[in-house]
Image (tube, rainbow, N blue to C red):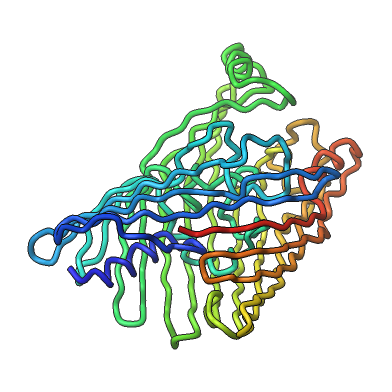
Amino acid sequence: MNRKLIGVIIASALMAPSVNAVEVYDDGKNNLTIGGFIDARIIHTQGQTEIVNGASRIRFDFNRKLKDQWSALALLEWGVNPVGSSDIIYNNRFESIQDKFLYNRLGYVGIAHEKYGQVTIGKQWSAWYDVVYSTNYSLVWDGNAAGVYTYNKDDGAINGTGRGDKLLQYRNTFGDFSITTQVQFKNNDFYTCDIEAISEAACQTLWESGSDLAQQVEFNSTYGAAVTYSVSDDLKLTAGFNRGELTVNYAAGRIKPVKDLIYGAGVTWGSFNRDGLYFAANINKNENHDTDNLGRLIKEAIGVESLLSYKFDNDIRTFIAYNVYDAGTDYVIQPNFNADPNDNFKRQFTVLGFHYLFDEDTIFYIEARKDFSDFSSADKEQEYQMSISEGDGIAFGFNYTL
């Protein structure tokens, strides 16, 4: 199989800001490359200043030539924390906060063919990410409005819209069109209670005792698809959806099916890493797909992300990003945590960025965020708890790509 094509397919599958890699082994049949980056930064937000990890990672990319132009591939990517554990909570959980030095980010295996496409199984970037990835280039405050990092800013593993767990995925390109389809085979059962600061074990005990404050939730398999149309070398259009279903079982015997749905479209002009103008934007409508900052399921919301960048020929890149995730009022499905039924949830912020590229793989950066969110509530303590995980901030650091 054409190795250049393999690289294009894998890069498309990852859709990460940096996919550079170093070849460490090639015997004509088997190939191994190592990639990733180390990012460390000083960040000031929420009244704290601290040195933190910037989603550093290491990636091992395997490829094996098979007969009849087929190729086998595998990828392992682990997040690493080179600066030690950190307890700062900042508005964008662009990595799942981990106490361990090494933790799983991606891992999949599959086969690929120049004509028939690629099939992979494992934890991997989702079809939905193909629709919205092009606004995800801020190194510190990437967006939380595109429905990727769901369930209180985690990595989108649960409902398969970020780095989805247990995905079976197919990718292929037909002329100017690229498609991705996927199914997430999983079945997770967990318990929720309308009580703050309760353990899952205690919540399960309440449910088993027949308490009206407890529910058992079954999160079943999901499926999704995306299409990208390359109108020209600069202009790309994307569209897609992802759907799943939750079943809520109440102690009194009532059962309620809940649809988890997101759909939307995006547009991209230019290349973020190339000199000149770059612009990207996307919009989505979603139902029961994400949670507010207290972990309550959001009934309906609209998300918009946009990014405008210009890279000068003197190795300076500037950008401005605007993101809004608006659920409005009356967005909580049921009055858990004694919620005000008229709580308002509108996450809204702007990011300004300055990147200096010593070369394309070594970047010094400064990024600042201004928050315009509205989390108004009649319960002022609840309003405070909603807003404390957002806020203004400034950070500077180094990103060293392997």
User: What is the quadrant of residue 230 in the picture?
Assistant: bottom left
- Quadrant containing the C terminus is bottom left
Q: Nearer the viewer, residue 225 or 234?
A: 234
Specify whether 141 is left or right of 389. Answer: left
Above or below: residue 354 compared with residue 31: below
Q: Does residue 277 appear left or right of residue 33 in this picture?
A: right
Q: Is residue 196 left or right of residue 256?
A: right
Return the x and y of residue 389 as percentages of the image width and height. 76, 44
How many marks overall?
0
Residue 334 is drawn in which quadrant?
top right
Residue 136 falls left or right of residue 324 = left
User: Which of these two is toward me, 281 or 370?
Assistant: 370
Residue at the front extreme? 358
For the view shown, which residue lies furthest in the bottom direction?
232
Q: From this view, report whether residue 194 is shown above or below residue 341.
A: above
Q: Nearer the viewer, residue 273 or 392?
A: 273
x and y percentages locating residue 399 in the rendered image: 58, 58
Instruction: Name the residue located 36 percent from the left edge and 42 percent from the top edge.
Output: 185
Quadrant, the N terminus: bottom left
Residue at 77% x, 60% y is 369
Q: Position of residue 340 (x, y in %)?
A: 83, 39
**Residue that appears at 42% across and 59% down:** 14
Q: Nearer the viewer, residue 234 or 367?
A: 367
